[in-house]
Image (cartoon, coloured by chain):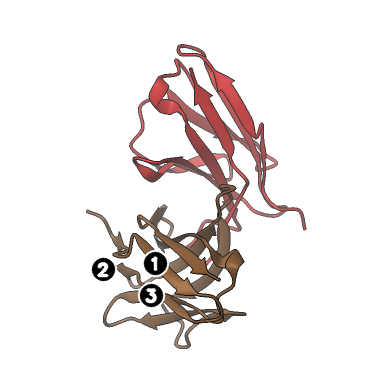
Chain colours: A brown, B red
Amino acid sequence: AQKITQTQPGMFVQEKEAVTLDCTYDTSDQSYGLFWYKQPSSGEMIFLIYQGSYDEQNATEGRYSLNFQKARKSANLVISASQLGDSAMYFCAMREGLRKLIFGSGTRLLVRP
Amino acid sequence: KAGVTQTPRYLIKTRGQQVTLSCSPISGHRSVSWYQQTPGQGLQFLFEYFSETQRNKGNFPGRFSGRQFSNSRSEMNVSTLELGDSALYLCASSLAGSFNNEQFFGPGTRLTVL
């Protein structure tokens, strides 16, 4: 059964505005990590941000923040002040314990000038 | 610190041939994972190696194999290539492959099977 769900296949955002990319997950483990990656058209997967299941604070990395709602099992990525270079595919991923990292189907973000 | 490197970056093969892809992890990282990415199937996990042992395995046929060396470098091999093996193959490394370790990806090897 798929454990990571990204319900937005594609999204548009105006340059300089904020955008939220949704991610929900399903796990019965207590120890897990949530990751967001950006994949531009070049193909390379770029690590953006990490949130651990035991972390009480939401993770932030520059313009990226993770809205972690453990009870709802959601880990949405918020990009503030969007830039044209933010146009890419975005993947949410989860790792339980020492098991493999699994990915959602991705959201294609297009930033409009 | 150097990132994850993969060689070659591009490869063209014909059906029935075999191919070997190489991945050098970030210095100090002991876990290496491989993924196949295609437009139709998305990102699919192939296998993970940790300290020269396969720790996790995806649902791929036996034509796909891998190994890890004592310096943590990893190779994956695909024998008897099929047209459907055309894909971007991504390698990723992490410190110990645990849930609280970030996993960093290489630039990928784009394989085309004719």
Find numbered disc 2 in the image and state the secondary structure of the residue it sits on.
loop
Q: Is residue A67 left or right of residue B20?
A: left
Amino acid at circle 1? Met
B82 or B78: nearer the viewer = B82
Q: In this view, does B88 lie to the left or right of B4?
A: left
Q: Mark 3 points at which residue?
A: A75
Gap between marks 2 and 1, in whole Å? 30 Å
Q: Quadrant of residue A108?
A: bottom left
Q: Indicate which disc, 3 or 2, sits on the residue closer to the N terminus.
A: 2
What label does residue A28 carry, if any? 2
Q: Which chain carries label 3?
A: A
Q: Indicate which disc, 1 or 3, sits on the residue closer to the N terminus.
A: 1
Q: Which chain carries label 2?
A: A
* x and y, in percent, of residue B103 in the image: 55, 58
* x and y, in percent, of residue B5 in the image: 68, 44
The mark closer to the camera, 3 or 2, is 3
* Labels 1 and 3 share a subunit: yes
Q: Indicate which disc, 2 or 1, sits on the residue closer to the N terminus.
A: 1
Q: Which residue is drawn at 26% across and 55% down?
A: A2
Q: Name the residue under label 1.
A: A11
* x and y, in percent, of residue A14 in the image: 49, 76
Q: Quadrant of residue B9?
A: top right
Asked if residue B43 is positioned above or below residue B113 in the image, the reply reads: below
Amino acid at circle 3? Ala
